[in-house]
Image (cartoon, grey):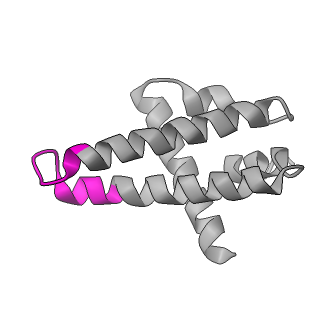
């Protein structure tokens, strides 16, 4: 299991609740795409504030789901949920990987 990605390990930890898996995949894909749109629009662009708020809400839900997965054996959550530049970069990588998994469904 050590060769699996954080995204795969996270989904495995939530495997007993398929609804939570689907919720995680949905919010991760949504947040990842919203982040890409925010980058294209830029901070001064029309609608950026709303995009930022929507992204933040999705990230909050993803972090909550990661927290639930910890109680089911998911390890490494601290690297994904820490409030720092590195933590956000790790979370964006996770969201990208989850979005790819969702796309492959």
Would residue 78 be found to the left or right of residue 73 on screen?
left
What is the x, y in percent for residue 103? 60, 73
The range drawn in magenta is 36-49
Name the side, left or right, on which 43 lies relative to 56. Answer: left
The residue depicted at 34 percent of the width and 58 percent of the height is 36
Residue 51 on image: x %, y % = 30, 50
Farthest residue in the left direction?
44
> Residue at 49% of width from left, 31% of height from top?
87
**Residue 12, percent across and down?**
83, 50
Vertical order, 76 against 61 (above or below): above
Q: Answer whether residue 48 is magenta in the image.
A: yes
x, y percent for residue 68? 75, 34
Q: Measuring 55% from the left and 53% from the top, which residue is drawn there?
A: 28
21 part of magenta stretch: no
Number of dots carrying numbers: 0
Residue 62 left/right relative to 8: left
Which of 12/57 is in front? Answer: 57
When asked about the image quadrant of residue 37, the answer is bottom left
């Amino acid at each position: 299991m050590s060769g699996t990605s954080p995204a795969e390990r996270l989904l495995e930890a939530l495997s007993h609740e398929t609804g939570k898996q689907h919720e995680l995949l949905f919010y991760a894909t949504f947040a990842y795409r919203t982040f890409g749109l925010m980058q294209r629009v830029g901070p001064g662009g029309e609608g950026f504030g709303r995009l930022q708020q929507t992204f933040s809400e999705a990230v909050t839900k993803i972090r909550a789901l990661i927290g639930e997965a910890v109680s089911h054996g998911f390890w490494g959550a601290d690297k994904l949920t820490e409030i720092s530049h590195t933590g956000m970069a790790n979370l964006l990588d996770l969201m990208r990987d989850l979005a790819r998994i969702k796309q492959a469904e």
